[in-house]
Structures are given as C-alpha cells and as structure tokens.
Amino acid sequence: MRLRILILAALVAVAAFPAAAGAGKATNVEVGNGFFGPANLTVKKGAKVRFKWTPSLELHDVHVKSGPAKFHSPTQAAGTYSHKFAKAGKYVLFCTQHTDMTMKVKVKKR
Ligand SMILES: [Cu+2]
C-alpha cells in the first residue's frame, strides 16, 4: 500500500514538472535539407534553442526574417548554433540559402 502511494507521488511529481522549454536545458531544432524540425516551436523567454545541422553537402543558416530581435548563425554544412531568446514575441526564421526553408518560434513572456 505504501509503495503504491510512493509510485503515485512520483507520477504526480513528473506531471507537475514537465520538460518545459524554459531555463536550463536547450531545446533542439534540426537543420535538415530544406526544413527546420520542428517548423513551429514555442518556448519561454530566456530559453536556449540549439540548432543542429544534419551533416550534408548543402549549406544552411538560421536568420531572422521577422521578430523582436535579430540574430544569425554562420552558413555551414554541419555543426550547431545556439541562441538564447531574450525577447518575447513571434519570430520567423529562415535559411538565406533556401528562402522557403522557414520556421516559427513563439517566445512567451513567462
Ligand atoms: Cu538551407
């Protein structure tokens, strides 16, 4: 009986603290050939997003098309780029090498 309560308490604890895309761990985004995965992302203000290139012969980058702050990654065929979203709002990101390669990031105030 006591064990059952402990298991229940553990489940409640896990449910109360889901893997929120907030402080601490970075949220990963795949930079693929012709796409960002996921194409839509919601994070909290201050969240770190880590873009990881799927190694290929094609060059890609991450630029801000529209949004409350500008940033851009190097143009590269492999590697990673991390960005901390310090300003809340809606961002549209794109790859300058493939302008139809876009993604949306919604950064919540809290
Ligand atoms: Cu590209």
Image (cartoon, rainbow, N blue to C red):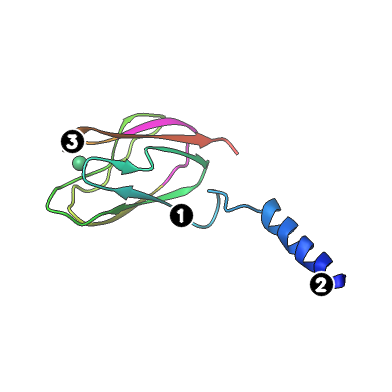
Q: Which mark is residue 3?
A: 2
User: What x and y, as percent, mark residue 110?
Assistant: 60, 39
Segment colored magenta: 84-93
How busy is the neighbourhood of tag 2: few (under 14 within 10 Å), some, or many (20 plus)?
A: few
- Residue for badge 1: 26
Mark 3 touching mark 2, by CB under 8 A? no
Q: Quadrant of the N terminus?
A: bottom right
Residue 37 part of the magenta segment: no
- Residue for badge 3: 98
Q: Nearer the viewer, mark 1 or mark 3?
A: 3
Comparing 26 with 8, the one in front is 8
Q: Is mark 3 within 8 Å of ligand 1?
A: yes
- Name the chief secondary structure element in magenta: strand
Mark sitting earlier along the chain (1/3): 1
How busy is the neighbourhood of tag 1: few (under 14 within 10 Å), some, or many (20 plus)?
A: some
The alpha-carbon separation of the residues under discs 3 and 2 comes to 55 Å
Q: Residue at x 52, y 41 (%)?
A: 45
